[in-house]
Image (cartoon, rainbow, N blue to C red):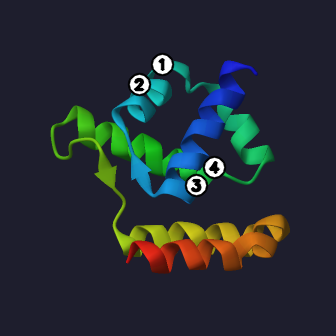
Amino acid sequence: MTREAEVVAVVTHAIYKEHMYLLSDYYVVRGWLNESALSLAYELNVVDSLEVAVTLNKLIERGFIETPYKLPLPRTIVTLTNRFTRDPYFRGTFLNLLRNLTREA
């Protein structure tokens, strides 16, 4: 797996599945995010997860948040709604995701 694919996989897992951003996620984004990773994210329709990660990295660097950081439910809902509207495969697995969200609440 390339670094570009790795950073996209790490971030999408953190944002879409775990709704939790770890210190290791911060370092992967900081070290490996580049134009090729961004292009891959656009190709896979997951660029919004990278946007969230970049924002979180900036907040961490400025000392506004610490890791592990649990994404607030409203942010999670917006991110998942955006993903739902753009990705037919994601729509097919959305019921499983809703079950997981209700367990976390």
Using the rendered view, name the quadrant where residue 104 is placed: bottom left
In the image: residue 10, left or right of residue 71: right
Mark 3 surroundings: few (<14), some (14-19) or many (≥20) residues within 10 A: some
Describe the element under mark 2 as helix, strand or loop.
helix
Mark 4 surroundings: few (<14), some (14-19) or many (≥20) residues within 10 A: many
x, y (%) of residue 66? 21, 42
Residue for point 41% across, 68% down: 75
If the image is split into quadrants, where does the C terminus sit? bottom left
- Foreground tag (2 vs 3): 2
In the image: residue 14, left or right of residue 23: right
How much space separates mark 4 and mark 3, taking CA atoms? 4 Å
> Answer yes or no: do the residues labelled 4 and 3 have beta carbons within 8 Å?
yes
If the image is split into quadrants, where does the N terminus sit? top right
Task: Looking at the image, tell me whether mark 3 or mark 1 is earlier in sequence order.
Answer: 1
Q: Which residue is mark 3?
A: 48
Judging depth in this view, the residue of 47 and 67 nearest the camera is: 67
Specify the label residue 27 is tagged with: 2
Residue for point 45% across, 44% down: 53
Amino acid type, residue under disc 1 in the picture: Gly
In the image: residue 93, left or right of residue 33: right
Q: Which residue is mark 4?
A: 47
For residue 2, above or below residue 43: above
How much space separates mark 2 and mark 4, taking CA atoms? 18 Å
Task: Looking at the image, tell me whether mark 2 or mark 3 is earlier in sequence order.
Answer: 2
> Answer yes or no: do the residues labelled 2 and 4 have beta carbons within 8 Å?
no
How much space separates mark 1 and mark 2, taking CA atoms? 6 Å
Residue for point 35% across, 45% down: 56
